[in-house]
Every structure is written in structure tokens, then in C-alpha cells.
Image (cartoon, grey):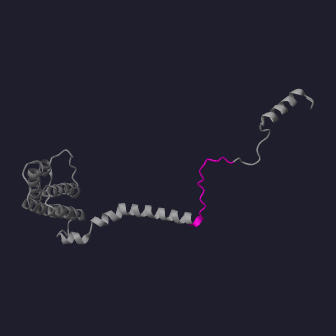
């Protein structure tokens, strides 16, 4: 092929006329997206922000595991409630139930004591009880000394008549459940120590 080749000449004229690119660009072409997100920050600021974020995440993780437990498991509150040997969770349940009873919500307070009594029974005696069992069945099946069985039975009877029945709960009903709860906690503490 020679330089006087009519095909090459026609192709070069067409490329020039149409303004087509003949070679690779030497510099990158910037595309304008309309948004400019580049904010020049010194690296120290970025490190400070990263450290603060990591610190906050560590604090929230600690609070979720330790802080929340410490907030509700106050050893002074346990002794003030007369439960020096009882578990701190029992003290927390008692304190919550006392608050509910102080608001006149005796049914809810008694129900809370029953639920915590059953949980402590499972945990304290390491007994597996089916979730489908009623409170009466648990009283009958639990291997408790008579004192503990009577205390749990007293709680169950008061809660059944107020929670499931039409009997309005009174302060006397709550006081009876609370005494039963403390007695059961003492029995379970004795069983754990043995």
C-alpha cells in the first residue's frame, strides 16, 4: 500500500471530518458527577474519630455484659432486703416486686415472684422441667423439702386466684407471697450449699 492509496486517504478524511479519536488519550478524563465529596481532613482527625468510635463500641459492649449486671446486682441492696445468702437476682426480683406492690399492682408483683421462684427452682436444684407444666405440677414434681414445697405452694395458690381467677389481690396476699418467696430462697440456698 502506498501513500497515494485512495482508501487510506478517504478513511483519514472521514476520521478528520467526523472528529473521531485517532489515538489513546494521554491524561485521564475527569467525569463530573455533580457531587464533590472530597473534604480534606488531616490524618490526626480521622484517627481521633476512629478511636472515639472504637471506644464507644467497647463501652456499649461492656455495658451490655458487665454494666447492666452490676447495675441490678447491688450487694448492699441484697443485704438491705434481708437476703444476705440469697442470689442477687432474687434481690432484684424482690425489689421490682416491692415497687409494683407499692404502686398497688399486687397481681403483677405476685406473678413476678412466682416466675422468679420457678426460675430459681430450675437453676438452684438443676432440675429440668418442661415448659408445658403448670405451676401446680411443678410443685408436685419438684424435689423440695416440705418447708420449700409449702412456701412454693403458698405462692402458687395466691397467684392462681388473682392472676387466673377473679379474686382481687390485696397487700396481705402480696405479703404472703413475699414471705413464701423469701422462705423458698432460703431453702434453695441451703440446697445449693449442701
Residue 64 on image: x %, y % = 36, 60
Residue 154 on image: x %, y % = 8, 56
Residue 4 on image: x %, y % = 93, 30
Q: Quadrant of residue 190?
A: bottom left
Q: Is residue 174 above or below residue 76?
A: above
As rendered, which of 110 and 65 lies closer to the eye? 110
As rendered, which of 45 and 117 lies closer to the eye? 45
Q: Is residue 11 above or below residue 102?
A: above
Q: Say if the magenta span includes residue 137.
A: no
Q: Quadrant of residue 39?
A: bottom right
As rendered, which of 163 and 40 lies closer to the eye? 40
Judge left or right: residue 30 versus residue 22: left
Dividing the image into 4 quarters, which one contains the C terminus? bottom left
Which residue corresponds to the image point at 66% horizontal and 46% vertical from the top-left? 31
Judge left or right: residue 63 versus residue 98: right
Magenta region: which residues? 30-44
Judge left or right: residue 19 versus residue 189: right
Residue 114 on image: x %, y % = 16, 55
As rendered, which of 164 and 41 lies closer to the eye? 41
Dividing the image into 4 quarters, which one contains the N terminus? top right
Judge left or right: residue 40 versus residue 59: right
Q: Mostly what secondary structure, the magenta segment?
A: loop
Q: Say if the magenta span includes residue 35.
A: yes
Which residue corresponds to the image point at 59% horizontal and 63% vertical from the top-left? 41
Which residue corresponds to the image point at 9% horizontal and 54% vertical from the top-left? 158
Amino acid at each position: 500500500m502506498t501513500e497515494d492509496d485512495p482508501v487510506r486517504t478517504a478513511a483519514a478524511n472521514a476520521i478528520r471530518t467526523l472528529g473521531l479519536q485517532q489515538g489513546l488519550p494521554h491524561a485521564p478524563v475527569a467525569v463530573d458527577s455533580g457531587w464533590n465529596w472530597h473534604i480534606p481532613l488531616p490524618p490526626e482527625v480521622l484517627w481521633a474519630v476512629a478511636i472515639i468510635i472504637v471506644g464507644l463500641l467497647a463501652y456499649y459492649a461492656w455495658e451490655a455484659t458487665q454494666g447492666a449486671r452490676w447495675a441490678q446486682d447491688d450487694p448492699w441492696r441484697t443485704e438491705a432486703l434481708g437476703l444476705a445468702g440469697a442470689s442477687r437476682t432474687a434481690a432484684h426480683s424482690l425489689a421490682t416486686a416491692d415497687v409494683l406492690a407499692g404502686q398497688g399492682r399486687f397481681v403483677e408483683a405476685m406473678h413476678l415472684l412466682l416466675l422468679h421462684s420457678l426460675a430459681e427452682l430450675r437453676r438452684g436444684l438443676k432440675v429440668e422441667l418442661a415448659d408445658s407444666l403448670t405451676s401446680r405440677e411443678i410443685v408436685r414434681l419438684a424435689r423440695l423439702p416440705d418447708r420449700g414445697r409449702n412456701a412454693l405452694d403458698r405462692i402458687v395458690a395466691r397467684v392462681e386466684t388473682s392472676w387466673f381467677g377473679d379474686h382481687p389481690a390485696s397487700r396481705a396476699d402480696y405479703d404472703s407471697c413475699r414471705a413464701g418467696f423469701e422462705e423458698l430462697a432460703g431453702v434453695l440456698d441451703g440446697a445449693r450449699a449442701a
